[in-house]
């Protein structure tokens, strides 16, 4: 139980284009979704927290106009990287808390901007 | 916000030797603590977690961790390391005001034959 499905797993896009990453909770309602970014050989850094039906909250230093987060339903949260540049190339992963203080993670999206 | 420190960036052990990876946390209340393992290019795999109760937690793959409140620590141990344990290990603390999870910087484990 408590599965989050993340798509796509890999994406290559051209500089200046936008990319959307989806995280769906398959068997539970995810009222909250956390979005992380992991650069090579580094740790996971929390970018933002999305809550269903309200605006996302962003960590300090994360550009909210560049990383658009939408959490319109209890089972879907999306992260859109707008006007992507090579420095946005990274591993993006979502996570949702579920009953019992557990957390479930998506499988991650490796974004490469060329 | 809560935070996690993993003092060791890289550890090398011989196969069959014991292992201890250190983790210290900062959090005002009783933390939710986790250890994850990540192989190159892969996602996270949960090894074990602590919420409450017995402070010695058993996980998968023969790992265990002990929560020590007095030391604000949650060190990961394994009595005998296998070559397949070579990976990146992350300690994380959850809960917090926002119920979010924060990760330590990670410890890269190398296993010598």
Image: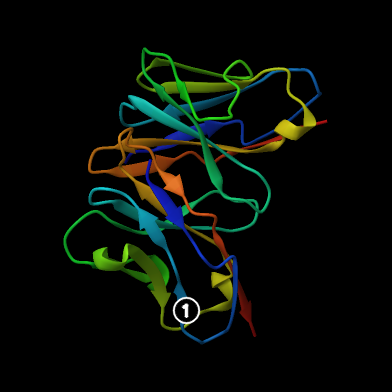
The percent position of residue B27, horizontal first and vertical second, equals 31, 49
The percent position of residue B48, horizontal first and vertical second, equals 35, 60
Q: Please tell me which residue is depicted at 24% across the width and 53% down the height of the picture.
A: B51
Chain containing mark 1: B
**Between B2 and B106, which is closer to the camera in this rendering?**
B2
Report the side of A73 relative to B18 (left or right): left
Res. B34 image quadrant: bottom left
Query: Which quadrant of the rendered structure holds the N terminus of chain B?
Result: top left
The percent position of residue B102, horizontal first and vertical second, equals 43, 45
Report the side of B42 relative to A100 (left or right): right
Element type at mark 1 = strand
Q: Please tell me which residue is depicted at 53% across the width and 25% down the height of the picture.
A: A22
Compared with B72, A58 (above or below) is above
Compared with B112, B49 (above or below) is above
Q: Which residue is mark 1?
A: B19
Report the side of B87 relative to A73 (left or right): right
Query: Which quadrant of the rendered structure holds the C terminus of chain B?
Result: bottom right
The tally of labels here is: 1
Compared with B95, A84 (above or below) is above
Q: Residues within 10 Å of mark 1 (few under 14, many from 20)?
A: some
**Between A44 and A19, which is closer to the camera in this rendering?**
A44
The colouring scheme, among rainbow, by chain, secondary structure or one colour, is: rainbow
The percent position of residue A110, horizontal first and vertical second, equals 66, 38
Compared with B88, A60 (above or below) is above
Q: Please tell me which residue is depicted at 56% across the width and 39% down the height of the picture.
A: A108
Residue farthest to the left, as pictured: B53
């Amino acid at each position: 139980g408590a599965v989050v499905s993340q798509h796509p797993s890999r994406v290559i896009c051209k500089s200046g284009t936008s990319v959307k990453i989806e995280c769906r909770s398959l068997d539970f309602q995810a009222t909250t979704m956390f979005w992380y970014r992991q650069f090579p050989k580094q740790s996971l850094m929390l970018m933002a927290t999305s809550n269903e039906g309200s605006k996302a909250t962003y960590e300090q230093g994360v550009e909210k106009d560049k990383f658009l987060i939408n959490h319109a339903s209890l089972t879907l949260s999306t992260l859109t990287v707008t006007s992507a540049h090579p420095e946005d190339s990274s591993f993006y992963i979502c996570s949702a808390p579920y009953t019992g203080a557990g957390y479930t993670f998506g499988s991650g999206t490796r974004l490469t901007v060329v | 916000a809560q935070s996690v420190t993993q003092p060791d960036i890289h550890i090398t052990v011989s196969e069959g030797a014991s292992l201890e990876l250190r983790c210290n946390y900062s959090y005002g209340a009783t933390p939710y603590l986790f250890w994850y393992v990540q192989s190159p290019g892969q996602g996270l795999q949960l090894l074990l977690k602590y919420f409450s109760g017995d402070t010695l937690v058993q996980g998968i793959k023969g790992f265990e961790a002990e929560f020590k409140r007095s030391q604000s620590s949650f060190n990961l141990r394994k009595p005998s390391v296998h070559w397949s344990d070579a990976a990146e290990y992350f300690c994380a603390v959850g809960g917090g005001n926002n119920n979010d999870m924060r990760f330590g910087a990670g410890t890269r484990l190398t296993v010598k034959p």
